[in-house]
Amino acid sequence: MLYIWDIEKIIKTTLHEHNLDINYEFDNNLPAPMSFNVSTNTIKFNYLQINGYRGKVRIKESDENFVKIILYHEIGYYLSFKKNKHDLRTLIYGGDDEKEKLMSEIETNAWEYGRTLVSEHLLESYDKVRELDKMLIKR
């Protein structure tokens, strides 16, 4: 089982390795394993959700590598928002089709940009988590 301090250490080390100035914090009310908030530049995580997600997404990686994989996806959001100036007003005022299109674009970009940071030995697992995540969302 991964604990808060284990996850914090992995996040801190990974952000430092990539020279990324992103805040991070634990949030036990977060309904997802991790989330990136563009307005506060913060990655939030819920260790219980991470452990539950670990049980659903079965890959042969260490706990540390598993956390890194989902962290790289969240960092992908950070990189996406840095490189693309999405009009987030669409998510509030846009029609359903516009919202869905923008959310899909942001999600795809997050996976792609996050993948650019993944070390060679984790690429296959990262891609597998991406596919398994798509299947979980469809359910």
Image (tube, rainbow, N blue to C red):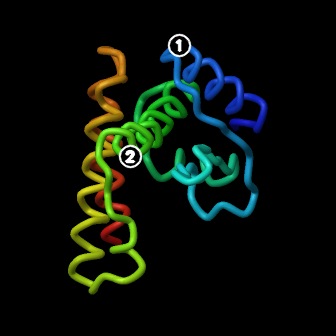
| Side (left or right) of 42 relative to 121 | right
Crowding at mark 2 (Cα within 10 Å: few <14, some 14-19, many 20+): some
Which residue does the image show at 41% across and 45% down from the upper left?
Answer: 77
Residue position for label 2? 81
Measure the alpha-carbon separation of dots 1 and 2: 20 Å
**Disc 1 vs disc 2: Cβ atoms closer than 8 Å?**
no
Determine the image quadrant of residue 123.
top left
| Front-most of residues 46 and 60 | 46
**Percent x, y of residue 48:** 69, 52
**Percent x, y of residue 51:** 62, 46
Q: Which of the numbered marks, if any, corresponds to residue 17? A: 1
**Percent x, y of residue 46:** 68, 51
Which residue does the image show at 38% across and 74% down from the upper left?
Answer: 91
Q: Which of the numbered marks, if any, corresponds to residue 91? A: none
Determine the image quadrant of residue 83.
top left
Instruction: Name which of mark 1 and mark 2 comes first in the sequence.
Output: 1
Which residue does the image show at 25% across and 50% down from the upper left?
Answer: 108
Which residue does the image show at 62% across and 18% down from the upper left?
Answer: 13
**Percent x, y of residue 129:** 35, 42
SS at mark 1? Answer: helix
Circle 1 or circle 2, nearest the eye: 2
SS at mark 2? Answer: helix
Quadrant where the C terminus sits is bottom left
As shown in the figure, which amino acid type bears the numbered disc 2?
Phe
